[in-house]
Structure formats: C-alpha cells, structure tokens
Amino acid sequence: MNSQPFLRTFTAPAVLCAFGFLAAMAAVLQFSLRAYIPGSLEPGGFTLANFADLLKPLYARVFLDTVWIAFLTAASTLVIGYPLAYALVRMQNAIVRSILLVIVVTPLFLGEVVRTYSWIIVLGNNGFINSMLRDLGVVQQPIQFMFTTFGVVVALVHVTMPVMVIMLAAGLSHIDRDYEKAAASLGAGPIRTFLTVTLPLSMPGVVAGVTTAFAWTFSAFATPQLIGGGRVNMVSNLVYQLGFASFNFPFAASLCVAGLALTIVVLSALRLAARPLENISPH
Amino acid sequence: MPRSTYQRLLDVFGKLAVLLILGFLVLPAAVVTFAAFNDKAILSFPPQAWSLRWFTRAINYQDFRDGFHNGLIVTLWSSTIALVVGAMFAFVLDRYSLRFKATLEGVLLSPLVIPHFTVGLGFLILAAQVGLTRGYPVVIACHVVLVLPFVLRSVYVSLRNLDQSLELAAASLGAPPLRVLLTVTLPLLLPGLISGWLFAAILSFNEFTASLFVTEQRTQTLPVAMYNYVREFADPSMAALSVMYIVGTAGLIVFANAFLGLGKVLNIEQNR
C-alpha cells in the first residue's frame, strides 16, 4: 500500500504557485540589471548602472529614512504593544478577553488605506486633535502633524500594532507560569519577577514581533504616501513614483532588490543580536 | 498573602496603561465615525448636525461600486484557489516526507516578509514579459501568492490538533485513503478550512499596495478606488465608506471568533 497517497496531487499546485512567485521575483531581479531607455517600456541591455545610481545622495537618503522610520516604528510598537499583549494573555475574564482580541485584531484586516485615511482625519490641520486643541484654547495655530516623520510614524505604529501584539501574545502564552510563581515565592516583587523571569522568557515573541513590524513598515506604501505627502518618502514611494510617473521600471526594480537585500541584512542582524537573549530560555 | 498598596497601585497603573493603548487603537475609527455622520463637509468636533448623505454618496459613487464588484471577483477567486492549494500543501507538510519540503514551504511563506510593492512590481513585469494584459488573472495570481501563507498556517494548525486515531480507525475498518480523507479528515478540518478561507478573503479584499501595481482602471479593487478618491477629494464620503468597511470587517472578526476561536488560530491561548 502506498504510505503517502495523494502526495503528487497535493504538492503539484503548491509547486506551481511557488514557481509563479519565483518567476515574478526573477523578473524583478532581471529588470534591475537592465538599462533604462527613456520613453520606452522595453529595457535595454544588461548593466550595473542602476545599482550605481542607488548610491546617489538623493536615493541613499530615502533608504536611510526608511530604515530610521522602520526602526522608530518597530521600537514604539514594541513598547506600546507589550502591555496590551500581556493583558490579552493574562486576562481571566473570557468576555473581556474576547473584546480585547476583536479590538486588537480588527485593524489588522482593515487594510492600509482605511486606516491611513482615518489618521488623516485625526492628524490634519483641521483634524480631530487640532480642532480639539483649538477649541480648548491650547493652541492658536494648528500643530503640523501631516507631512512630518512624526505623523507617519504614529500612523505606522497603529498599522503594525495588531501583528506585534499577536506575536508578543503568542510568546507570552507559551510561558510556564510556575517560573513566575517560583520567583514570587522566593520573595521577588512583581516588577522584579517581570524583569527577571517573564520578560526574558518572552524574548522569542519579542524578536518575532520586532522582525515582523520592521518588515511590515518597510512594506508600507499608502501611509507614507498619503501622510508623508511627498515630504516623507520611503522606498515604496520611490518605487511607485519611478514606475508609474517616469516608467523607469529597471531602476524601480533595482530599488526593490536593494530594499530586499537591506531587509534581509537588518533582520539577520536582529536575529543574531537576539540569540544570546533567547538562550536564557530554560526550555 | 494580603495585597499591599504597592501591588494595588501597580495593578491600577497597568489597567490605565492598557486602557490608554486601547484608546489609541480605537481613536481613528471613532473619529472617522463622527466625520461620516457629520452633515458638514468640513470637519468640526463635535458635529453640529447629523446626516446620512455621505453614506448615500459613497454607495452611489460609480468608482466605489466598480471597485466593490471587482474586489469581490478577485477575492472569491483568489481566496478559494489559495484555500485549495494551501490545504493540500498543509496536509503534505503535516503528514508526508518529501525532498525540498522545507524549501518549498520557505518559498510559499516568504511573501509574508517580502514587501508588497516588490511582489506587485514582480507580477506586473512578469505579465508584461509573457504578453498578458493586466486583466483579472494577473491580479488573482498575485493575491493567491500573498494570502497563501495565512491559509497554510491556519490549516496546518488545525491538522496538528486533529486526532489521527479517528482516521486510523476508519482505515482499519477498510476505508480506502480517499474515503478516509473525504469522510473523516475533511469534516474534522472544516473549522480550520473555514477560518483559513475567511482570513484569505478578508486580506485579499483589503490588499492595497500590490493591487495598485497590478490593477488598471478596468480591474481596480475597492482599496485602490478609495486611495484614488482620497488623493482627489476631501469630502466625508470616504469616511462613510470607511465606517461601512470597519463595521463589516469587525462583524466578520466577531463571527470568526465566536465560531472558530481566533485565539486558537492565532496560537495565543494561554495553557490554563
């Protein structure tokens, strides 16, 4: 009897999908090595000129900004998301826990456009915060949130929060609570127990969360496009602009390849840096 | 052990922090709701008069209608294809040994960390190279790849939690593999399959960045139509549409949580 029935039938569609995806990625890679012929959609011969162009201050700057924004977002999301994840996992009341879960998870599925639009209404010069402050007499002139790095980061933190909380909660939920009880019975206070037992044990969740938050922020397009309004640019905005405003697809492709390489480098560095921390785990 | 004032203080402080964070999460949705029901086109808080006119406008706006229609086509196809492909491969992942299994899994999961603008650009260039116009097939293929990781994970988790002795019992009673699969495994997997499909459908319907690259006027999905609207107009029709979106999505999530247990799917249930 065949011990693995349906093996081929079940694997074939997955292989097809993987090949389709790899072909698309190969297309990007191939285009990144082709010359751009102005006014033509067809690329020219093979060249490394696109990658040399990436080093120009204009483009290098966008890369640095992107990494900086992604870093700020991941760090803020971690700090704000941790208490929420903790509450989500440790909440005893099942109904309150369900409500928390729905509040946390719903934004994940709302998509970037709706959420970014909501933040425009909150942060705009005539938006919620500014009209509140004006009515209360706190400010005469509106505070400029739109088109600033701060505004973009606030919205991005909101966009990445659900996935961070889910990753952190997954890490926290797998902690054996006997360790905490042991620490408490040995006389450690709640803060000390948290800092020396719970936090180190939740490190795998923290690493997973920060990694995903970083990758997601790097991938964000609508938020920097609409809230940054051209004054805060990330790699994604540049790729779109090059592709659809100047039809320079080879250069757009090289930006994608460089962005991907950068993501891999940063994420590997994060993983390496976190390794000693993860070894603390007694499992 | 009596709780000290210090511990109680810590408790209150923790609850306050969580409430503040929840406020931050809910704030944009609350503000958008106010704006949507506000009679005036200019934002003012609190609104002086209420009306439903922005909802009427949003529902009757042709680009939104087309976007909704296109989005449904793309979503139904892509989430269903992803479900079939993902469920089959999750089965292979859980049960079988296969050369390059880990590699194949890695490739299929990689869209989780590859920026959507890169995936979108890739499919756009690929379509142009093989001479396809930017029709539905390209959009659907792109969405299948993007939502597949979520289906794969959801079905895989359900397979892990499945009691294999039931399948063995059926097999030992003489049921051939296909019959075991269809009459035992599949029904047991149903919650996982439904939640996987639901995840995929919601994500596909909301996908924006890659869609912006691979759609054109004729195939543009709702998020793309919304993005174009925000860039051109500033009236609260978009707020009204957002409210409908938020209510619809939250409704689906509440449904998924009640019937399928989101905590289990997301792997965040505390072992009690």
Image (spheres, grey):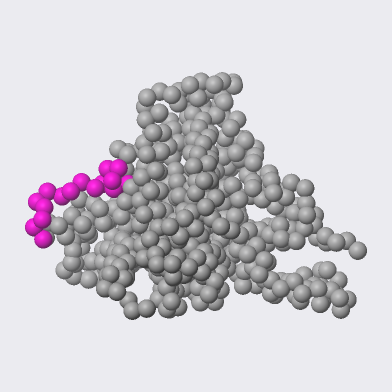
Q: Position of residue B72 (x, y in %)?
A: 52, 61
Q: Is residue B56 visible?
A: yes
Range covered by the magenta-colored residues:
A136-152
Q: Position of residue B112 (x, y in %)?
A: 55, 50
| Image-based side of A167 in relation to B238, left or right | right
> Is residue A138 located in the magenta-colored stretch of the structure?
yes
Q: Position of residue A155 (x, y in %)?
A: 34, 52
Q: Is residue A111 visible?
A: no
**Where the C terminus of chain A falls, by quadrant?**
bottom right
Q: Is residue A76 above or below residue B51?
A: above
Front in this rendered view, residue A18 or A72: A72
Q: Is residue B78 above or below residue B104?
A: below
Front in this rendered view, residue B201 or A192: A192
**Where the N terminus of chain A falls, by quadrant?**
bottom right
Residue at the spot x=65%, y=39% of the render? A23
> Is residue B55 located in the magenta-colored stretch of the structure?
no
Q: Is residue B37 above or below residue A233?
A: below
Residue at the spot x=40%, y=67% of the render? A187
| Image-based side of B58 in relation to A271, left or right | left
Q: Residue lying farthest right?
A: A1
Q: Is residue B80 above or below residue A280?
A: below
Residue B160 placement: quadrant: bottom right
Residue at the spot x=51%, y=69% of the render? A178
Residue at the spot x=72%, y=50% of the render? B101
